[in-house]
Amino acid sequence: MKKLMKGNEAIAEAAVKAGCRYFFGYPITPQNEIPEYMSRRLPEVGGCFLQAESELAAINMVYGAGGAGARVMTSSSSPGISLKQEGISYLAGAEVPCVIVNIMRGGPGLGGIQPAQSDYYQATRGGGHGDYRTCVLAPASVQEAVDLTQLAFDIADRYRNPVMVLGDGMIGQMMEPVDMDKSYRPAVDLADKIWAANGHIPTPGRPRSIINSLFIDPKVLERHCERLDAKYKKIAESECRWQEEMLENAELVVVAYGTTSRVVRSAIRKCRQQGLRVGLLRPITLFPFPTEAIRNTLGTAKCYLAVEMSAGQMVDDVRLAVNGERPVHFYGRMGGMVPTVAEIMDEIRKYATPYQKTPAEIALDSAIDEKFQSVTDAVGHILQRTRKKMKATGSGK
Amino acid sequence: MEKQFLIAGFGGQGVLLIGQLIAKTAMAEGREVSWMPSYGPEMRGGEANCAVVVSDEAIGSPLVSEPEILVAMNKPSLRKFMPKMPAGGLLLYNSSLIEDRNLREDIRIIAVPCNEIAESLSTPRVANMVMLGALQAATKIFSKEVLLAVMSEWLGKKKAHLFEVNKQALGMGRALVR
């Protein structure tokens, strides 16, 4: 049965269902329902919730629990995620799987508490120091927040890498129906965590476990970085996800992710009714970015429009995908302001013109109309004859 | 079919609950729904509102910038959101707290004396349920029966004794529209 749930609470419950037993965090709006829910729920399932003294402490507790092989999560919002960056870099360097939820708010600095998407660069480019990537999943509905949170744990374990669930204040605060009865099963390919440092006695099949990101010898560090890089390339190959909507014949392809894509969807539906050939390509994973999916639209697309709640960050990835072959436009709102359907429709109208039929299509249409008319006439005749007959025989009263 | 509601008032008047009960009822009837609250440094007495979208297909924007159906529980909400309504929209306002001056003429308007009716039941807190009853009868987007079932579930065992007064409040709100 479906349940009406807040995004934040749904993310927390989804994590518990996925076997997350440890949560370390520090409060910040608009994600407070996640720690609140975890503080109540984790003790019920024999887990541990701990409100750390700071974001730094929280992310390093994640390092400890993840390094010991546990499924562990932390959550925060933009300024708090900035504080966690050092720890995230260490987690990536030491290859510790974990899930980090960022319910974005307006920035920079303390910014505001309303929804924003201005942490895209930080999330997809690593955020902390060093050559590393986190896999980034961007839900657009509460149900998807549930599905992607559970997927995040699998991806984290599969690659021994931090995975970020990137939402915004809107997805955290809104309520939508979710199916929580769906049972979660970990992906079948996940191996035992023989690397975990959990106090086991070293045996031939299981060597001593060391969780470490310090490699003093540059030759050794380079080899480590090359291995990490190969891993990120594998993630890019295997974990890319996106959704296509109304892309058929789309001359204008709008690219938007997360909650912004919802507003865009409403705008596109209305524009399609007005005959504008416009469609939506929604990246579900931001790293890896669906570059190929975008390139596959080059056949019909005359131009692209990226819509974001930022000054224009994801638009760079769209430009990289399109590679100068088509114009890429941008529309964004900032500081916690959410673009409206009307604003996006105005923007779409700037770049999309109503479709003009070709002479061949006009000829085909009139041929179909003619055929339809003749069939309608024939049916009309039959009906008339039947009615006459019924009258004559006095039946049908 | 897609219907957009905006329910606004003071924090503490139960506007978020009105919206949640609409969303839960419509969901129980098999519709797609979304509920989006205003959030921030809200407190009792501050401004609060929520947007509810009920639809037969997957919902696009969960935000409501031009409310087809507006519930205004206090004067500031009416002043803020009535100008944004499209012509032909439906306004239900709490006439216990709002005088009927300067209302638009191109929308359907229903005055609901929520607080007076709630006080007549000796339970001021059910003012929001009076409004919800009127809203149900005026829109018929969701049924009274399912609404009552959802409300009973929401109250749970601990507050089951409050079901009767809430049901009465809903009924009196509905009677105003009939």
Image (cartoon, rainbow, N blue to C red):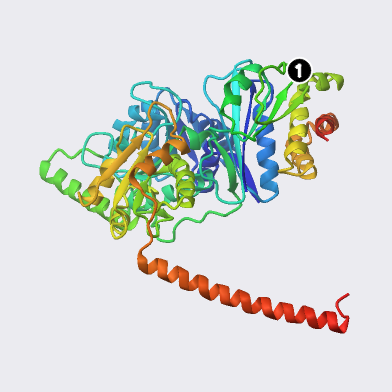
Q: Position of residue A217 (x, y in %)?
A: 12, 41
Which of A51/A357 is in front? A357
Rendered position, B124 above or below A85? above
Q: Position of residue A107 (x, y in %)?
A: 36, 25
Type of amino acid at the residue the image marks with label 1? Ser
Residue A41 horizontal side relative to residue B170, left or right: left
Residue A177 horizontal side relative to residue B142, left or right: left
- Callout 1: helix, strand or loop? loop
Note whether residue A92 is visible: no
Rendered position, A371 above or below B170? below
- Give the letter of the chain under mark 1: B
Residue A367 horizontal side relative to residue A60, left or right: right
Note whether residue B83 is visible: yes
Which of B10/A194 is in front? B10
Rendered position, A117 above or below A270? above
Q: Residue at x 47, y 38 (%)?
A: A341
Q: Position of residue A8 (x, y in %)?
A: 52, 36
The residue pinned by badge 1 equals B96
Q: Position of residue A301 (x, y in %)?
A: 31, 55
